[in-house]
Image: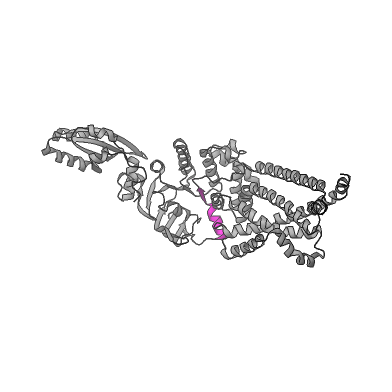
Amino acid sequence: MDSTWQILQEHLPQALIDTAYMVVISAVVGVVLGSLVGLLLYLTENRLFHPNHVLNSVVGFIVNAIRSLPFLILLVVLIPVVQALIGDPYTPTGGAIALSVSAVPYFARISESAFSEVDDGIIEACLSTGATTRQVLTGAVLPQARPSFVRGVVLMIISLIGASAMVGTIGAGGIGDMAIQYGYNRYETGVLLVIVVILIVLVQIIQWVGDRRARHLTH
Amino acid sequence: MSIIELQDVHVTFHERHKTVEAVRGVSLKIEQGEIFGIVGFSGAGKSTLVRTINLLERPTQGRVLIDGKDITAATGDELRKLRRNIGFVFQSFNLIDNITVGANITFALKAGGVDKAAWHDRTVELLRLVGLDSKIDSYPSSLSGGQKQRVAIARALANNPEILLCDEATSALDLETTEEILALLKRINTQLGITIVFITHQLDVAKQIFDHVAVMEDGQIVEQGETFDVFSAPKHPTTKSLVDRYLGIAIPPQLVPSLPAGTIVELRYRGDGALEPLISDVTRQYGVSINVLHGDVEYFGPKPIGTLIVLVDGPAETLATALNTLKTHVYSYRELDRKQLAQPARGDGQQGEE
């Protein structure tokens, strides 16, 4: 037990920081770029905005292509790319890049579906007042889509925490890395248990905060 | 010059494996300041037609003229400017649920390029017009259907339009609320001089507020004119079917077998000639008996249309002449078949959808 405590004291803070670093960066990149791609998919799909079947299909195909790879395989495929970008792929930054690449198409689909849930009748009513596309988006589509959007962000963060643990399997750091190094390779069951508890608590908190926020935005 | 003119408008939808011609060559003129109704059964193309007026649906052929100007090809700024001048009220209200009532109105003001400083006052003014200024900070979900539609009307009027399009604006409301909304629209029409185009399948609505009416069937206008004239003397089968359904009164089937002998006749008469003198004249002159089995009067605007179901019996030699006299003095005369009357009523929706 003594050594479990020592390992935790020595490595857990850094592992948590690394995980947070990877998840926050990829979540931010995912939300920003993903919602832009999602918006592009939505605008080119909806007949009330700027339907463009070709552009929609091309972007949709790329999104699907990246999403068809299980994260572990995407990670391995990206190793040379990340190497070319930052030198050492087996670092939290390398992990963050790989996570971001998977987060963008993931959130693109989530935000696209949040936008698509907005009743076309509302959009027609807004267009009938003479509003521009931008006014309809900011004034009607966003407030209507926001609760689903927030739930989507929560879903993405939780799956990014899961994926960040996988980054650990290639040794890029974070609590996943720690769980494998000590819990799996060195049979430190105590370390593994603590990490499991931390993950459960973390995911519960994020879900709770997200649900509250989404409820608050729904009227 | 008419405020709205449609010239040979066609709208064709291309779906995966078929082509749907929703509107087929409609020409219409709607005058400044009137309430113009378009009625028809569902699927007749009414909604598609009214949506061409603000180009929510673009005609595949034909022209739309507003104030004499061809707008069919308008896009961008020109289209947006045009739409500010044409309010639209929907059956399902279509308010933005996640923002307040006030913010819904402000949205339209913003879209109309109204100066930010004027937003609040104008929002209050519009909500007051529809009697809901106290709800400015409420969310739409806390309002009743009628209140939601009032807010939608206020939004549609935000940029002082000349024209208000209403697509089944009362069809989702109960009877009492419908009356309230119609009264509001009538007031808007007279006070603000706004031309209203109103789509409905409810003749109840049509008879209350329409000045002129067009009857639509299968993408075409089959009959049009002043509301009372169209409904008191329907010519096209669709109009007849609409009117029949609305004015239709029936004798309870279980009573039919116990009726005395005679001919059962349905008479329809316009407001200008009351029926009592005719009935007593015929009774006296031809020695027949006329029993009123059922009767009803409906008002289209100020003018009534009456329906009577009578049982006529008498000596064979005068009966035919008596019936003939009745026939020539009413605008609709129909002898009813006892066997059919004795059958339970047909399910709604079978009649008239031909």
Q: Residue at x 59, y 60 (%)?
A: A44
Instruction: Please state which of residues B14 and B258 is positioned toward the viewer in this rendering.
Output: B258
Q: Is residue B269 above or below residue B46?
A: above
Instruction: Please state which of residues B311 and A117 is positioned toward the viewer in this rendering.
Output: A117
Instruction: Please state which of residues B62 and B258 is positioned toward the viewer in this rendering.
Output: B258
B88 in the magenta segment: yes
Give the tally of numbered discs.
0
Q: Is residue B131 above or below residue A117?
A: above
- The answer to whether residue A119 is left or right of residue A37 is left
The location of residue B23, given as percent across then percent down, is: 42, 57
Residue B271, quarter of the rendered image: top left
The location of residue A33, given as percent across then percent down, is: 70, 58
In what quadrant of the picture does the N terminus of chain A appear? Answer: top right
Q: How is the image coloured?
A: one colour
The location of residue B273, given as percent across then percent down, is: 26, 38
- The answer to whether residue A45 is left or right of residue A27 is left
Q: Residue furthest front?
A: A187
Residue B19, quarter of the rendered image: bottom left
Examine the rendering and report whether any part of residue B112 can be seen: no
Q: Residue at x 80, y 47 (%)?
A: A189
Q: Residue at x 33, y 50 (%)?
A: B238
Which region is colored magenta?
B74-91
B46 in the magenta segment: no
The location of residue B85, given as percent across then percent down, is: 52, 52
In what quadrant of the picture does the C terminus of chain A appear? Answer: top right
Examine the rendering and report whether any part of residue B213 can be seen: yes
